[in-house]
Image: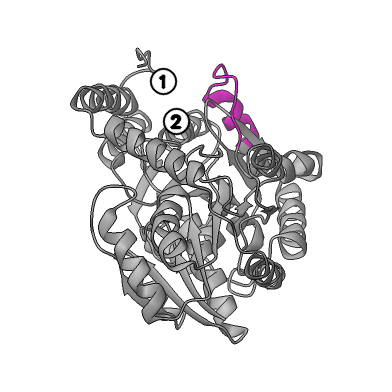
């Protein structure tokens, strides 16, 4: 089978790494796989996994006509049997290009936390959680499967030694180290990261705690400022932002506890660390037998009431730091669950079986669906590039950044 895999971007992130790992698994099973996308930090990772990379046109609009035409040409030149796109912008690039023009079967994976209405109903989908799978089946006429984000449990394992990472960052043997590996993004991430820093502030009066945040992004300056205020208050280094690492396995292994969401939480569990799973609006829960069903259904993420503050997160982390026996027990439990349900070895055959089913049942594109999808995509792009909306979005982001750097959290913001 000749397959083109099209991640939504090639910055460092869980969805993109999942796409590349699954592509490498398909290649190892004997298929001809190429990865297509706008160049970014993960190109090195793609090449390290032994995959061929084709750079996409850098056009800024989504979907982009240059990429639509480029994919149609690639479908013919590469004699593609299937395109696997991740998230809605690559899905529409491929749908309008290789799908409509060249008739290449298309599969789309959606790991974001909503079903986008501009994805055509005839496109078969893979969703990342049971809840999202149920939601997608209500609106899609094509097949919908659920495949949780897979983890390479051979590479991410409890035998990884984190001592060198601790030494590199000046973590003493008696320091209690909490690790976060995350993009420092404003959307989806900033709320959780601010609450994590504030929780470390509370815990610093009780433990010799260090919080290391591994990652980078547009919220870096604001989070640096908030961390600096915590460090000044305690007259020592409590919170450190280390920057991004392409291979953060030693960071996970070094932690006495890990705070994370999505694939980051799963990778930490695979390495045998106890984990507090975060989400938006104050959501946080320890991963343990009592919360397993919750995370299986909704994914390793959640939405809180907005009323929870850093104190709840601090209590959850304190519970893990206060008992080595509990932390070790939950680390072993997490490793077992990830190996049994979330391993890449389990996911690759499932995905290859989905490929076979998509190939055997090509979608029929209806004119009404094509026009409706094109209209929705165009309206979304017009809205995204509306100067008035951009000004409102900029004002909102500035308010969030100001609150993150020095003010109370969550901030009071007038929504659009």
> Does the magenta segment cover residue 304?
yes
Position of 76 relative to 328 (above/below): below
**Counting residues from the N terminus, which is met first, the one under dot 2 or under dot 1?**
2
Q: Residue at x 45, y 29 (%)?
A: 198
| Of residues 363 and 29, the one drawn nearer to the viewer in this rendering | 363
Residue 314: numbered disc = none
Looking at the rendered structure, the secondary structure element under dot 2 is helix
The image quarter in which residue 398 lies: top left
Residue 191: numbered disc = 2
Q: Is residue 192 left or right of residue 414?
A: right
Q: Which residue is farthest front? A: 367
Return the x and y of residue 254 as percentages of the image width and height: 53, 60
Residue 93 in view (yes/no): yes
The image quarter in which residue 58 lies: bottom left
Q: Is residue 408 left or right of residue 83?
A: left
Looking at the rendered structure, the secondary structure element under dot 1 is loop
Return the x and y of residue 67 as percentages of the image width and height: 30, 60
Return the x and y of residue 202 as percentages of the image width and height: 50, 28
**Residue indicated by mark 1:** 409
Q: Is residue 228 left or right of residue 181?
A: left
Q: Is residue 416 left or right of residue 206?
A: left
Which range of residues does the magenta coloring cover?
A: 302-316
The image quarter in which residue 334 lies: bottom right
Image label count: 2
Count residues near mark 1 (Cα–Cα under 10 Å), then give few for <14, some for 14-19, many for 20+: some
In which quadrant will I find the N terminus?
bottom right
* Distance CA(mark 2)–CA(mark 1): 8 Å
Q: Which residue is farthest bottom? A: 30
Count residues near mark 2 (Cα–Cα under 10 Å), then give few for <14, some for 14-19, many for 20+: many
Badges 2 and 1: C-beta atoms under 8 Å apart? yes
């Amino acid at each position: 089978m000749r397959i083109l895999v099209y991640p939504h971007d090639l910055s460092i992130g869980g969805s993109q790494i999942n796409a590349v790992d699954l592509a490498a698994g398909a290649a190892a099973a004997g298929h001809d796989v190429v990865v297509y996308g706008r160049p970014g930090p993960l190109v090195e990772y793609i090449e390290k996994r032994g995959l061929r990379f084709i750079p996409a046109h850098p056009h800024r609009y989504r979907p982009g006509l240059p990429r639509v035409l480029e994919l149609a040409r690639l479908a013919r030149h590469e004699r593609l049997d299937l395109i696997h796109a991740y998230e809605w912008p690559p899905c529409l690039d491929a749908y309008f290009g290789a799908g409509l023009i060249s008739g290449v079967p298309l599969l789309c994976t959606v790991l974001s936390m909503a079903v986008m209405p501009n994805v055509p109903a005839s496109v078969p989908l893979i969703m990342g959680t049971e809840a999202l799978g149920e939601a997608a089946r209500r609106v899609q006429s094509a097949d919908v499967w659920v495949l949780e984000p897979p983890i390479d449990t051979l590479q991410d394992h409890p035998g990884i030694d984190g001592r060198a990472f601790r030494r590199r960052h000046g973590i003493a043997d008696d320091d209690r180290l909490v690790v976060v590996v995350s993009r420092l993004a404003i959307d989806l991430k900033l709320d959780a990261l601010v609450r994590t820093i504030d929780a470390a502030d509370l815990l610093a009066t009780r433990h010799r705690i260090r919080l290391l945040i591994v990652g980078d992004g547009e919220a870096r300056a604001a989070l640096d400022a908030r961390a600096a205020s915590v460090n000044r208050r305690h007259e020592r280094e409590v919170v450190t932002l280390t920057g991004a690492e392409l291979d953060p396995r030693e960071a996970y292994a070094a932690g006495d506890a890990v705070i994370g969401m999505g694939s980051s939480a799963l990778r930490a569990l695979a390495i045998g660390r106890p984990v507090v799973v975060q989400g938006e609006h104050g959501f946080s829960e320890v991963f343990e037998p009592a919360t397993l069903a919750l995370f299986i259904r909704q994914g390793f993420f959640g939405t809180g009431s907005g009323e929870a503050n850093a104190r709840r997160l601090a209590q959850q982390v304190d519970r893990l730091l206060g008992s080595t026996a509990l932390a070790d027990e939950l680390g072993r439990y997490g490793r077992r669950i990830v190996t049994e349900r979330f391993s890449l070895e389990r996911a690759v055959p499932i995905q290859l079986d989905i490929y076979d089913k998509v190939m055997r049942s090509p979608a029929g594109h209806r004119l009404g669906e094509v026009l409706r999808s094109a209209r929705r995509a165009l309206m979304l792009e017009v809205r995204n590039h509306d100067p008035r909306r951009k000004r409102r979005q900029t004002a909102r982001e500035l308010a969030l950044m100001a609150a993150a750097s020095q003010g109370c959290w969550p901030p009071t913001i007038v929504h659009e």
